[in-house]
Image (cartoon, rainbow, N blue to C red):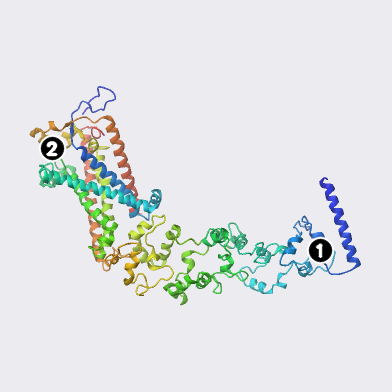
Amino acid sequence: MNGAAWKNATLTVRSLALAAGLAVLVLAPRALRAQDCLTCHGDASMTDSAGHSIAVDGKKFGDSIHGSLQCTNCHADIKGYPHPDKVAPVDCKTCHADQATQLSGSVHADTKEHPCTSCHGNAHEIFPKTDARSAVYPLNVPKTCGQCHSNNGMAGKHGLASVYPNYIDSIHGFALSKEGLLVAANCQSCHGSHHILSHTDPASPTYKSNIPQTCGNCHAKINDEYQAGVHGQAIAKGDLKAPVCSDCHTAHAILQPTESAFRMQSTPICGNCHKDKFSTYRDTFHSQLGSLGGYVETARCWDCHQAHDVRPTSDPTSPVNPANLITTCGRCHAGANASFVKYQPHANARDRKLNPGLYFVRLFMNLLLASVLTFFLLHTILWLIRSRLSQMKNKAGNGGKHA
Amino acid sequence: MPEPQTAIPGLNPGAGEKYYVRFTREQRYMHAVLFTTFLGLAATGLPMRFSESFWARRFGTGVGGFGAILFLHKFFAVVLTIAFLIHLKDVFQRGIINREKGVFWGPTSMIPNWKDVKDIFGHMRWFLGLGPKPQFERYAYWEKFDYWAVFWGMIVIGFSGYAMWFAPFFAHFLPGWALNAVLVIHSEEALLAVLFIFSIHFVNTHLRPDSFPMDMVIFTGVESDHEFEEKRTLEYQRNQAQGTLQKKVGIAPPLWLLNFSKVVGFTAIFIGLTLLVLTLTAYFS
């Protein structure tokens, strides 16, 4: 059977079905059922005058969370057949008023740009979020958000960064995409779903002072430690200069803290605030060797000061409290003793008052270096000039015998 | 002065001239071990000293990361330490046990003497065109400086290096701040050694017009009659007067040795100058 004949046949069938349907309507007027609508809209190739698909997959719709509803529950302006060419857009708010209210106060309030379907997918194929077919099933959330929040995504129009690639390569992204861990943090675990607010909004879970609590929803023990440390206490007092989780771990690209990339990038982050400590640290062997990359086992800030539970030196529970130094240094330096731990990891050779011994050693070494090099540089330059002059005078050739 | 012509093509151009042995095989090997380990130590030490510079991390990754760079540095250090101990034993053997003359005193000794002081001033006067060129003995003052600079550097850099390597052990004898100081001492003294060897030693010994582009004597061990007399007039004349010159006659270096020495020597100079440029760019940036 060729294409034209096939089309004719389907048209005939369709016309017959339509005729039968009309007959039923005329004979016994009653509410439209999904089956009635699917008579036409069940054809996968059905389009409106603008060419947009207006087909509905009856099977999938039946399986969907709205499967028990009738078409006219949502398409309420359609009272019978034939219906007008133009029908009113469906308003999800009619049933989902709470979500609509939340959405209207969020960054996605513009319903033209962010209709419900942009996240929940095809309106006729919406599944509960516990169903793997749902666009908002935990394992599908990043891809759904990534449609806009990715390279060349719509979010770029508003000057937002492309975060999807960062997330998907992060430890959370791996846990989700590789291991399929439903508990792994996806976008909405931190940002919420309908009521997403800008991180500059104090009510947002991603507002700086709320971040420890947001991460702490899963990382409870780390959050407890953090809250006990100086940074957590500063944040609790409202000092927003203190670092929160994302300042060291970043928000989306979160790396394994044992990875060399993380160890390499994090020390300068502490240095953003602790400038003098960072500068003196950089003079030490710990830093010199550590800057060379690879998985570097030299001490970084948090190896001595702790990462989350940073406490002042005066605190007896701090690992850098003088009473604890032998243990702390001994973690790397087997055999560390009381004299060994007098080593100053932040000594400043340029500070005469603070480190007089070191200051004079450095001064002596610099003077030695400068004087030896100055003398011999002058000596060599004068020698070069004189030998060349005398060589030219004697009309001798270049170099030694075996040069 | 016209070059002696080679009678047979393919033989080395110096054939026909008399050659004198200036350095023993052991002394040449010692120099080879010294410059090989020194280059190795400099190449693995400088990236640590200038770890923030653009080339350090690339180099560190290139040799296999920080672990490899530290391992190689310690390896070269141990080899150099052994060479230094062998040298000390050798000096002790010759000077104390065998009571060889001229090790600790006299014209062939490395110990500075009054003539060296006079030579410094005499040489400087000659540089400025104020006097005649001084004549030199077995070791000139700048060579004695080279020797003692390395000797002092070995002790200072070596001691501070081992103090860092075995810090908990050294902490039994050293005050706490000394553990901070050893890094300053180690890196500053090493920087001095690197800058000195790769600029001043290279020019004084190899690149100055009288020796350009390289003085081969430390590689071949022999020097031509003409060059010996020209460069070490006093030593030449003293040996002539004592009748010991004949004892020093050696054979002309074969072509393969000359070529091999040139490859090794120029490679060392090339690596050294590269490291010098990298050091200077890191130091002044």
How far from the left and from the top, in percent, is residue B168? 28, 62
Q: Label 1 amino acid?
A: Gln
Which image quarter: residue A79? bottom right
Indicate the quadrant containing the C terminus of chain A: top left, top right, bottom left or bottom right: top left
How far from the left and from the top, in percent, is residue A261? 45, 58
Q: Is residue B112 left or right of residue A308?
A: left
Which residue lies most toward the top here?
A: B7
Q: Is residue B76 left or right of residue A12?
A: left
> Does dot 2 land on a helix, a strand or a loop?
helix
Q: Is residue A37 left or right of residue A180?
A: right
At x 86% / y 69%, what residue is drawn? A30
| Circle 1 chain | A
At x 37% / y 56%, what residue is drawn? B52
- From what the image shows, is residue A335 above or below residue A230? above
Q: Which mark is residue B235?
A: 2
| Circle 2 chain | B
- From what the image shows, is residue B16 above or below residue A232? above
Q: From this viewpoint, is residue A377 visible? A: no
The front one of A87 and A118 is A118
Indicate the quadrant containing the N terminus of chain A: top left, top right, bottom left or bottom right: top right
- Residue where numbered disc 1 is placed: A35
Q: Label 2 amino acid?
A: Glu
Label 2 environment density (alpha carbons within 10 Å; few <14, some 14–19, many ≥20): many
